[in-house]
Amino acid sequence: MKVEKNKVSIKPEATIGETMQFINDNEFGIALVVDGEGRLMGTVTDGDIRRALLSGKTMDADIAGVMKKNPIVVPQSMTGKSIAELMRINGIYHLPVIDSSGKLVHLESERIYGAIKESLTAFIMAGGEGMRLRPLTENIPKPMLKVAGRPLLEIIIDLLKAHGFKNIILNIRYLGDIIEDYFKDGGDFGVNIKYITEPKPMGTAGSLSLLEKDEIPEDPFIVMNADILTGLNFKAFFDFHCAAKYDFTLCGRPYKVKIPFGYPIIEGDTVRDFREKPEFTHLVNSGIYCISPSLIEHIPRDENFNMPSLIKKACQEGKRVGVFPLQEKFHEIGRIETYKEAEKFYHEEMALSYINRQKK
């Protein structure tokens, strides 16, 4: 399909943060960087941005330093049939069309976020007892606690559905009948829901071993906790995993650690520099993962087995394990205090983007 250039064009002085938001809003998964005269300078995808952030780039850096400078392009004179064949041969979904002077004419795109195949799957771990949220969870499972008038789990399913994840597997145990009675087969919520019931606590990865062979998704799938609110573009996360051919990708959120003392920079036995109360940022586990189906056979059956153990096992066995830097807002509901803050987080950080997605 032809996409008008103004819908995907961005200036080279735009920041990484601005470009990330632009890509998330335009539904095409790409930004085309053009100069003041309309000439194509390069292309940028969400994956390009995440890799740049991992290499040390900041959200305030110019996108010109991240873009792919020599993308595949085609002349305006090429026929639609030839363009489609070129995209098929090269395994690409976007192809800029330029005129003889290098100016962008339009974008040919075979995929938009609103036209995602129906087979994408998300596995949500919703079986915990929510002990730190007592007494709120004495008679209701934590995922069914209401935020902005709706169960938390309903908001999560809505977010996944908006990004094309319409096959939902719910891992339930504690008061699971309440969850099952509310969502049933998912039809009323625009998704397909299957249930996996834990016979006992099996950890954050152990319940995946309960999937029968015919229940295991053919494609990589999202695995996440049921106590998270986030503005993450789940489809971009999925694409990042697939493009790099990872076996396991964890979504890492930035966590700042400030040392309250002076910090010497030492080389050998010599101090080369000195930093006063430095602050370091590390990527920590967010409880959101993308997993390739082949990894399920590495999870022991009928045992308590956690995601950190699966990650270590995958690394030890030489699997490709990646990390996706989460720059979007994130809020975990684990205690009474964070539950009280969830309503504010939803209205300030998520409600507007949710409304915009519904309009598209």
Image (cartoon, helix red, strand yellow):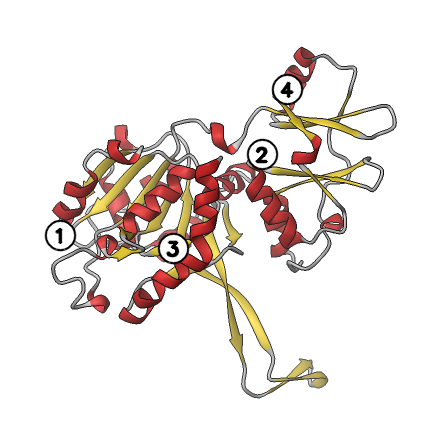
Residue located at (38% from left, 37% from top): 161
Q: Which mark is residue 229?
A: 3
Residue 184: x, y in percent? 18, 36
Left or right side of 230 for 200: left
Residue located at (30% from left, 50% from top): 205
Query: Mark 4 = which residue?
Result: 89
Query: Mark 2 = which residue?
Result: 28
Q: CA distance from mark 2 to mark 4?
A: 20 Å
Mark 4 is surrounded, within 10 Å at the Cα level, by few (under 14), some (14 to 19) or many (20 or more) other residues, namely few
> Of marks 2 and 4, which one's residue comes earlier in the chain?
2
Q: CA distance from mark 1 to mark 4?
A: 51 Å
> Of marks 1 and 3, which one's residue comes earlier in the chain?
1
Query: Mark 1 = which residue?
Result: 175
Question: Which residue type carries mark 4?
Answer: Ile
Marks 1 and 3 in Cβ contact (< 8 Å):
no
Mark 2 is surrounded, within 10 Å at the Cα level, by few (under 14), some (14 to 19) or many (20 or more) other residues, namely many
